[in-house]
Image (tube, helix red, strand yellow):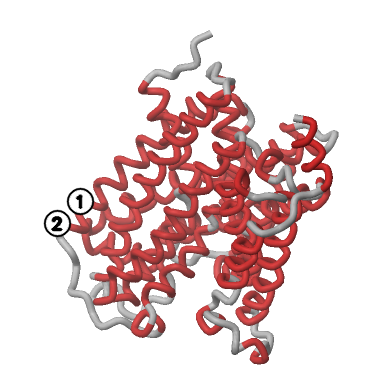
């Protein structure tokens, strides 16, 4: 059987992955970052693109290199540790933070502006409807590529192109001086801000959905799966970069129309209304609803796929469980949800980055099993210190750590651990295997 896809299916695959990524965080963080970066826009945007585009793309490639699944990616870790790590990531990108955030952002930016006196009841009703629709689309697991890649995403992309062209053709103000940390360390601040999109976590899980979609199209061979995974990752990365660059520029030229805004949603909303007048909110509502809905579908489907493979509960039952949990958590409120998620991201992001880095050097490691355990443990321990600092815990005793002051105290110890991994002795089992060969 020929393991090939039509060009339209390849593009649809990439569009589906792009739509899974492009959700709440991708829309609300770049505009505010752009406004605060001001005339330091370029280094701040480059740092953001490294974590919000570069890392997810590298993660997709890592999944392809490893074999296309989480089990392949974590084959050198203890089984229980690998399952626990995956479960934590799925909980974060699923019902705990990322998925409910899609519903919250959709409400705050696409629906709430149409109510004069918005109340909690409006959010409750909307979140129930929003996640009911997401569950409906996630229900048919094998049809995701056709529904999202060929229908929802093209409509979303058209809206984003219209917005991007308008932003560059008619900027609503001049860039102002950089503020806060963007003044002193714009590259690092942009890099850390990219954590908030949670796309590296998403990539770890969405890659598996792409593999499932490929199987539904008859692609089962490893070489073909790897090739199309990388194609999809490149298409999604190009789309994300296009969106982020336009939203950063929007933010950098927004000081006149959105002065004093405390979140990117307000910046984007006021800017779009300035651009398109009374129809601006309608344009924005369509873009935000489609972006948040496609991501919610992907997150609910990915979580259901994982938990159904580890438990006796079926995929469709997990779709309902995740959807209901997301609707409940969404009623916490956007500001509170973001505040709760930041320390968790600082704790787990470095571990994910370390895992991805190890994937590319695994074949050169003399003792992969020991190396994986050592490197991930080091990254977790130092990441927990960074997370404690973000959470407000006094960890001043660790100020002597390199890069600790900028929230990256984990980087050099983790890099050193990876370097040390190349000098580990081979295990007795490996030596016996080599002798037998």
**CB under 8 Å between discs 1 and 2:** yes
Camera-nearest residue between 122 and 351: 351
Query: From this viewpoint, is residue 106 visible?
Result: yes
State the mark number for residue 169: 2
Q: Residue at x 62, y 28 (%)?
A: 141
Q: Which mark is residue 312?
A: none
Nearest the eye: 92 or 60: 60
Count of marks placed on residues: 2
Relative placement, left or right, of 350 versus 56 is right
Residue for badge 1 = 165
**Residue 204, percent across and down?**
59, 46
Camera sees residue 267: no
Badge 2, how many Cα within 10 Å: few under 14, some, many 20+?
few
Corner quadrant of residue 15 = top left
Q: Judging from the image, what secondary structure is the residue with disc 2 in?
A: helix
Query: Residue 206, how many percent across, how many down?
Result: 57, 41
Residue drawn at the location 45% of the way across and 31% of the way down: 13
- Front one among 410 and 257: 410
Q: Quadrant of the C terminus?
A: top right
| In the image: residue 33, left or right of residue 313 | left
Q: Secondary structure at mark 1?
A: helix
Distance from Cα at disc 1 to Cα at disc 2: 6 Å
Return the x and y of residue 117 as percentages of the image width and height: 48, 67
Choose between 204 and 335: the one closer to the eye. Answer: 204
Q: Residue furthest front?
A: 435
Residue shown at the point (62%, 40%) measured from the top left: 132
């Amino acid at each position: 059987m020929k393991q090939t896809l039509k060009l339209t299916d390849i593009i649809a695959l990439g569009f589906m992955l792009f739509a899974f990524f492009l959700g709440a965080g991708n829309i609300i963080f770049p505009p505010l970052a752009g406004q605060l970066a001001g005339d330091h826009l370029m280094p701040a945007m480059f740092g953001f693109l490294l974590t919000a585009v570069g890392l997810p793309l590298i993660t997709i490639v890592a999944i392809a290199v490893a074999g296309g699944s989480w089990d392949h990616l974590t084959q050198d870790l203890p089984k229980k540790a690998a399952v626990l790590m995956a479960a934590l990531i799925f909980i974060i990108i699923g019902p705990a933070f990322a998925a409910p955030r899609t519903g919250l952002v959709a409400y705050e930016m696409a629906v709430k502006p149409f109510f004069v006196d918005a109340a909690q009841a409006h959010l409750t009703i909307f979140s129930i409807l929003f996640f009911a629709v997401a569950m409906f689309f996630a229900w048919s697991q094998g049809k995701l590529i056709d529904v999202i890649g060929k229908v929802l995403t093209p409509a979303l992309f058209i809206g984003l192109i219209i917005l991007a062209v308008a932003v560059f053709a008619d900027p609503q103000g001049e860039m102002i001086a950089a503020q806060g940390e963007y003044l002193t360390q714009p590259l690092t601040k942009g890099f850390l801000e990219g954590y908030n999109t949670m796309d590296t976590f998403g990539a770890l899980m969405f890659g598996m959905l792409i593999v499932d979609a490929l199987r539904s199209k008859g692609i089962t061979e490893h070489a073909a799966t790897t090739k199309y995974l990388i194609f999809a990752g490149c298409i999604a990365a190009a789309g994300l970069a296009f969106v982020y660059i336009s939203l950063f520029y929007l933010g950098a030229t927004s000081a006149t129309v959105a002065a004093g805004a405390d979140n990117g949603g307000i910046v984007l909303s006021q800017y779009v209304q300035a651009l398109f007048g009374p129809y601006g909110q309608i344009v924005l509502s369509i873009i935000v609803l489609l972006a948040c809905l496609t991501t919610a579908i992907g997150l609910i489907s990915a979580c259901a796929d994982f938990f159904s493979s580890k438990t006796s509960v079926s995929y469709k039952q997990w779709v309902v469980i995740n959807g209901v949990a997301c609707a409940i958590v969404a009623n916490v409120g956007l500001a509170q949800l973001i505040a709760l998620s930041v320390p968790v991201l600082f704790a787990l992001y470095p571990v994910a980055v370390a895992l991805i880095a190890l994937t590319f050097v695994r074949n050169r490691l003399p003792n992969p099993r020991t190396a994986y355990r050592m490197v991930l443990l080091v990254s977790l321990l130092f990441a927990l210190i960074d997370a404690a600092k973000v959470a407000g815990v006094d960890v001043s005793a660790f100020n002597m750590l390199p890069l600790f002051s900028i929230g990256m105290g984990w980087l050099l110890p983790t890099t050193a651990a990876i370097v040390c991994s190349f000098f580990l002795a081979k295990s007795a089992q490996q030596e016996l295997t080599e002798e037998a060969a």
